[in-house]
Image: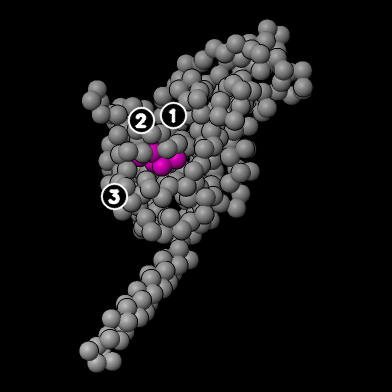
Amino acid sequence: MNQFMMMKPLLCGIILVVLTSSFATELESSHAKEIHHFDHNHSSWTSILKKYISSQEHGTQMAYGKLVNSSSEFELYLKELESVTQSSFHVFNREEQLAFLINAYNAFTVKLILDHYPVKSIKEIGSLFSSPWKKHFFTLLGAKRNLDNIEQGLIRQDVKAVQELEPSLRSRLKKFNDPRIHFAVNCASKSCPALRREAYIAKRLNEQLEDATYGFLNNSSSNRFIVDSSELHLSTIFKWYGADFKNGESSVQSFVAARMGRTPDEKKVIREANISYLDYDWSLNGE
């Protein structure tokens, strides 16, 4: 065997390594360019929210009727969200991912209402056999999705909901594990936490989530602590997702007390109070 034949496997290996490295570098550069062009400030969404949401005594109200007649800016924002690939999403840091998903959930919920406007409640869009949260009506991260895919699968990462996601997505999910998301996602109903008049953004995410949580808990139409009788009346959200709020806390009451109690004594009473749940108003949060 001559020297060239002996070196041939080595040369082929070197060429393969170089080509692989070159392809990986090119792919990484492509992803970096795509990520660089995505606006993590979600400026378009903030512009829309400021324009069509008004503050009310007990929350906010969306002017769906006005938005449905001038939705070009909104459609462009939805396209921005839909343009993000799974590869790019996986490179986002934790806060960028969570802000992206919260904004996407809220924006596509608004789209669902606009697609069926006028409606008196989001529940009118569903049926006995299909809830509005199970309707596949938009594309995100390269696949047709429904709202539950975002909230239950990608954000809450409920075991059953995660299994509905494709392996390439669920295998690389970052962990969020933050119950405050329940006060950031909006279900287009009066009893939902208010739809914020600004987008959630990575660099302010913790502050925004805490503000949304505090605001919801101290909204007397949604949650009430009656000092004289030590009665704690909470939104049904705390019943539906009780386990989420116990994560890192000894009880739902402990989570609530930290943000609703005004004094150490009041916080102690709240931590020991019995909970009753308020009726949930599914009427549309706007007109």
Q: What residue type is disc 2 on?
A: Ile
Figure check: 264 above or below 8 = above
Asked whether the viewer can see residue 286, the reply is: no
Q: Secondary structure at mark 3?
A: strand
Figure check: 61 above or below 174 = above
Residue appearing at x 70%, y 14% in the figure: 269
Please tell me which of labels 2 and 1 falls first in the chain. 2
Question: How many neighbours does mark 3 have within 10 angstroms: few (below 14), some (14-19), or many (20 or more)?
Answer: some
Question: How many neighbours does mark 2 have within 10 angstroms: few (below 14), some (14-19), or many (20 or more)?
Answer: many
Q: Which residues are magenta?
A: 149-155
Of tags 2 and 3, the one toward the viewer is 3
Position of residue 215 measured from the top left corner of the image (x, y, whole percent): 61, 32
**Which residue is the site of mark 1?**
189
Figure check: 165 above or below 23 = above
User: Position of 113 compared to 57: left or right?
Assistant: left
- Looking at the picture, tell me which residue is in the foreground, 83 or 122: 83
Real-space Cα separation, disc 2 to disc 1, in angstroms: 7 Å
- Looking at the picture, tell me which residue is in the foreground, 80 or 148: 148
Real-space Cα separation, disc 1 to disc 3, in angstroms: 27 Å
Marks counted in the figure total 3
